[in-house]
Image (cartoon, grey):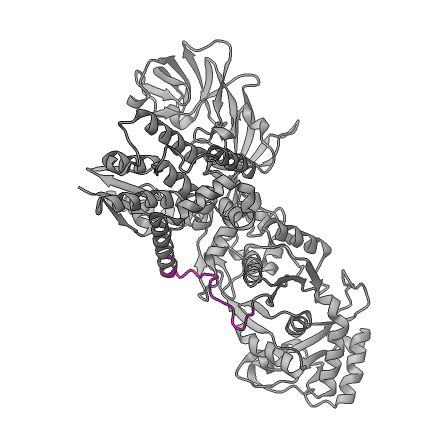
Amino acid sequence: MSIQLIVATKASPISYGVLAAAEQVNAIKPGAITIEYPDTKTLEAEGGATAVAKFNGQTYSSTNAIVRLFGRLHPETGLYDPKDPISSTLVDQWLDFAESKLSISDFKALDATYKELNKHLTLRSFIVGYQLTLADFVVWGALRGSPVFARIVKTKKESLGVYLVRWYEYINTLEVTKNAVEKMQKQDKLKVKSNEQGKFEIGLTEAEMGRVVTRFPPEPSGYLHIGHAKAALMNQYFADTYKGKLIIRFDDTNPSKEKTEFEDSIKEDLALIGVTSNHVSHTSDFFDQMYELALKMIKEGKAYCDNTDQETMRDERTRGIPSKCRDTPVEKNLEIFEEMKKGTDTGRSFCLRAKISPDDPNGTMRDPVIYRCNLTPHHHTGDKWKVYPTYDFACPIVDSLEGVTHALRTNEYRDRNAQYMWMLENLGLRKVVIWDFSRMNFVYTLLSKRKLQWFVDNKIVSGWDDPRFPTVRGIRRRGMTIEALKEYILMQGASQNVLMLEWDKLWAMNKKVIDPVAPRHTAIVKDKMVQCTIQGAPTTPEFKELPKHKKNPAIGLKKTAYFNKIVLEQEDAKSLEVGEELTLMDWGNAFVRNVEKNAEGDVTSVDLELHLEGDFKKTKKKISWLAFGANLAVDALLVDYDYLITKKKVEEGDELKDLITPVSEFKTPVVADANIKDLKKGDAMQFERKGYYILDSVATATTPATFIQIPDGKAASIASKADEKKTEKPKKEKAEKSKK
């Protein structure tokens, strides 16, 4: 009977190590293991594991269990010899090492781990003994699938240590590991294609190595959001790939919207996601050149001043009717443009339009506005200018003047590409290649800065860093790691497909980053918590040090208090029956001796009797608890959020005020173990049986520490609560009808 191995894709460390070990077994005993690559839903049915093995009716879902199964069933491979207790124990030790020390994202801890590995391999060709074992494949897989290790190997290989690099590169050359990588990458591409997700491997057209220049041109009129992050990372990706240059240019052509505050925040957020450049510029640096080019267009009869009111102009452009000002003589246009430059009353009633076509099939070519008056002082140039270029005029000019070779634009600008090229051609400027891609759209999410500003202005949110906002600062405050954000955006790639994305994959990827390093703590909901007395427990608190993370000892220890006075969750207490045996997590078993309830059916107190000799494997209930007394537990506040709007996709004509979620912030007071006082603002952690949280604000003399819940990607954590309320009533009515 062969072993059935089911492997997920997406370059999981588990997938690499397990698959390489399976390839080695099959190389020695062909057909011993059958390998399948299912869709995500198949593995979700297996509990969300990234690899599972099935044999003789049993399922194995952890890396170590799977590879040990391979080794024990096929000792002839020499990968794991159960008859040699010393060798097998050493292999076990290194399997545990890979699981606990190589699956974390703490750079400092990983650096120490790599040094430990390098030292161990000083006089060794293999991790254990004198031949390949499971330890080599699992440790290699953990390294091969680690974005941290991959980055160091690519940029600072020498810092890893000569012996670790020598061993790693040798394992990479093995036929079985090359097969594993090739199969993973092949399946990964197939999966991406089926999900309509793009890749950045699509090359730029007309690109020369060492000469590519890209630019990221944010307008400093708001904070950086997740859509901007994609554009920034794509521009950096192509600049790096072609060994070229990235320009960060602030598109500051509208002083009414722009602030230094926004520019500073964008610089900080770009640095946070790893997008940096030695060349930072402003469109305003080129105002003089653009003004001269506008004069040139007027003199050549390619632009005219127009005082048609906005509503009429919009109507004329829609119907393809030429403006009454279209044939104004050049001399008169120059006169008026001078008035516009001075910002006089007469000048302010005009705008400057490019004379392209009044009725072109492409609406963007119907004599677009290229200059308009604005008396608001500019945050860079002050009151020097009273007239400013529009984005459509400024962008191609500055791209050309700054040496940009490839302008990356979202495909919502595709109709404007013809206008972009017209400007370059008619101004006699150097050609720039346009390369477009789809923008990221998320359900229940607004990415329009104007609409986000509306929420800020109406005080529906606390600011641009509100955890409900899709800004980089907002999702960071909600617990998104930069590592997961970058990985997700790069995974989306250069797709041309306009997709309405769910948030689940992003938050699920984030969970994989924080779970290995998030310390575990306990919290009990304060409202209706149940006090409990335990016979046989210490009458004065006794403390014991326990690991903050059972699977990652490197996280450190916490002090747990054991006391005869504890508190339980109301829901747990309601489930208890007198006489039953339960397990108090991280303590031991106890018998339920008495349960008191009030008239409403809520439990008011519980009496337990400690039974530490009991077997926790035989109890059905594993209960969270907290020693309760002075300095044993502290107050805290847990905060969760819903989406800001109730509609998955906002349509043209929708009024924002009609889409606001009535209640989108939920606060739950709790008592938590006193170890949370050691946490710092921004630390991610887990309250066991409640979920992952990030410390948003530390406790003060008058306020408790505030923790924001981090979505884990599961349906319940990202579902719109507004939708749940809409469907509650119909479900209830349907149930009542079925009873009748």
Instruction: Return the residue nearer the eye: 21 or 358.
Output: 21
What span is colored magenta in the figure? 191-208
Q: Residue at x 71, y 81 (%)?
A: 307
Give yes or no for residue 396 being in the magenta stretch: no
Quadrant of the image containing the C terminus: top left
Q: Residue at x 48, y 40 (%)?
A: 164
Q: Residue at x 38, y 14 (%)?
A: 608
430 relative position to 54: left or right:
right
In which quadrant of the rendered view does residue 251 lie?
bottom right
Vertical placement of 136 versus 486: above or below? above
Task: Residue 556: give x, y in percent of width and height.
Answer: 52, 27
Q: Residue at x 56, y 75 (%)?
A: 417
Examine the rendering and report whether any part of residue 482 can be seen.
yes
Instruction: Return the residue nearer the eye: 148 or 381.
Output: 148
Vertical placement of 717 versus 352: above or below? above
Magenta stretch secondary structure, dominant: loop
Instruction: Return the residue nearer the eye: 701 or 694.
Output: 694
Vertical placement of 377 versus 123: above or below? below
Task: Residue 210: give x, y in percent of width and height.
Answer: 59, 65
